[in-house]
Every structure is written in C-alpha cells, then in structure tokens.
Image (cartoon, rainbow, N blue to C red):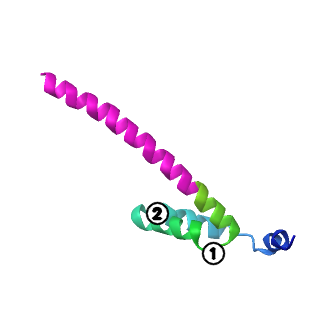
Amino acid sequence: MENLSAQHDSKIMTPKEWALTIFLASLPIIGFILVLIWAFDSNTDLQKKNWAKGTLLLMVIYFIIAMLFLFMFGGLALLMGLGS
C-alpha cells in the first residue's frame, strides 16, 4: 500500500515538460541515450519512466521492421543487379 500512495504523491508533468522531453528524445543519438537513462534510472518520475520504456519498445520494433525491409528490398536489388 505504501508504494501505491507514493505513486499518487508524484508530481504531474506539465505540457511544457512533456514537450521538452519529447523534443530531447527526438534528437538522433542524444535522444536515444536520454531515453535509456530515463527508462532505467531510479530517480526518474514514474510517468516519464513508463513513457521511456514504451518509447524504447517502439524503437526496437521500428528497427526490426527497418532491417526486414532493408534485407528484403536490398537483397532483391542486389539479385537484380547480378542478373543483368
């Protein structure tokens, strides 16, 4: 029960804080590092921590889909180039 009351006592992030968080996360390399820190740091707000974990999950899914397309279409282009 103590953990539940601690969740209710955490401060709510304002739209300004969310906008800054999303902007920083969208930066190419720094954003990925920040999302990792926010997801696994014990001092991060629970809301931001859950958002960062969800964002990491989406990043992994997008990466897998991108690699599948790269191998499928890149392989086809390579085979077509070898055939001519």
Residue drawn 85% across the image and 74% down it: 2
* 78 on left or right of 24: left
Q: Nearer the viewer, mark 1 or mark 2?
A: 1
Q: Which mark is residue 42?
A: 1
Residue 67 drawn at (x, y percent): 38, 42
In terms of sequence position, does the residue under pointer 1 or pointer 2 come before the other?
2
Furthest residue in direction top, as rendered: 84
Q: Is residue 37 part of the magenta span, yes or no? A: no
Residue 43 drawn at (x, y percent): 64, 77
Residue 16 drawn at (x, y percent): 64, 69
- Contact, mark 1 vs mark 2 (Cβ under 8 Å): no
* 68 on left or right of 38: left
Q: Helix, strand, or loop for circle 2? A: helix
Q: Using the image as rendered, state which of residue 27 and residue 74 is in the foreground.
A: 74
Q: From the image, tell me which residue sits under label 2.
A: 32
Q: Where, by quadrant of the figure, is residue 74 drawn?
A: top left
Q: Helix, strand, or loop for circle 1? A: loop
| Mark 2 residue type | Phe
Q: Quadrant of the C terminus?
A: top left
Q: Using the image as rendered, state which of residue 17 and residue 52 is in the foreground.
A: 52
| Mark 1 residue type | Ser
Q: Magenta-highlighted stretch: main secondary structure?
A: helix
Residue drawn 63% across the image and 66% down it: 49
Specify the segment rendered in magenta.
55-84
Label 1 to label 2: alpha-carbon separation: 18 Å
